Amino acid sequence: MQERTLLIIKPDGVARGLVGEISSRFERVGLKIVAAKFTKADQTLAEKHYPSDRDVWLRGMGEKTLENYKKFGVDPEKLLGTTDTLKIGKIIQGWLVKYIISGPVLAFVLEGPHAVDLVRKICGHTLPSEAVPGTIRGDLAYDSSYLANTGKRAIKNLVHASGSLEEAKYEISLWFSPSEIFGYERVEEKAMR
Ligand code: ADP
Ligand code: MG
């Protein structure tokens, strides 16, 4: 069940000085850092990372956004000019590209059993306002679709984590070359298996 996944501490996480706080949560659960890079994405990388033609993902963002608006009594038509989940996803994708290139980020490849799901569990719900305490987004942020979208910006949720094994493979290849990824043994591995 060894998997590899991409984790990015987004510009707000770096700017808030939360690099140590965030990365320690993955280390202490037993996930292995097999690659790390402090970098600033350019427009091309950002658009590959957040592709404007991945309809299922775009609709998913649109759906989560509509649910959040309903909760706060926000009219999507008034705020974004549409109720179409795909169109909403596309608007957000534009904001996301701006957000990820707005400052330096720290990208990691994390390896371990069930790494994709484990990392997402530690990150918490996409919307910090919905994320439970104990998760990175629940403990360290409070942003919501309402706050972000009234400001016409992406949700500041500190981290990106690949959503599936397939997404992880694609994203790792965007951010790292194979020679930048290192295999090694962590001393507690034997005790944990
Ligand atoms: P996750 O990051 O949990 O995998 P998604 O892939 O669905 O979530 O969304 C990608 C990113 O888009 C989120 O991490 C968040 O920064 C941003 N986002 C999602 N919904 C909205 C929204 N309604 N408004 C602004 N940004 C959003
Ligand atoms: Mg995602």
Image (cartoon, grey):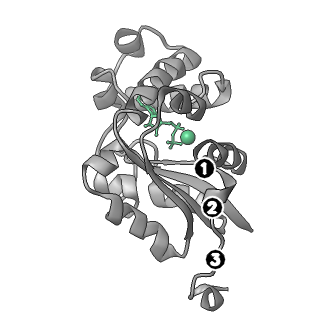
What residue is shown with label 3? 184
Name the foreground residue: 117 vs 27.
27
What residue is shown with label 2? 181
x then y, percent, for residue 20: 34, 65
Q: Is residue 25 left or right of residue 193?
A: left
Q: Is residue 69 left or right of residue 121?
A: left
Say if residue 118 shows up in the picture. Answer: yes
Q: Report which quarter residue 181 is drawn in.
A: bottom right
Q: Identify the residue at horizontal 47%, vertical 31% (top origin).
A: 42
- Indicate the secondary structure of the residue bearing disc 3: loop
x then y, percent, for residue 37: 48, 54
For the residue carrying disc 1, how many other residues have a C-alpha within 10 Å: few (<14), some (14-19), or many (20+)? some
Disc 3 residue type (three-letter): Tyr
Q: Report which quarter residue 157 is drawn in.
A: top left
Disc 2 residue type (three-letter): Ile
Which image quadrant: the N terminus? bottom right
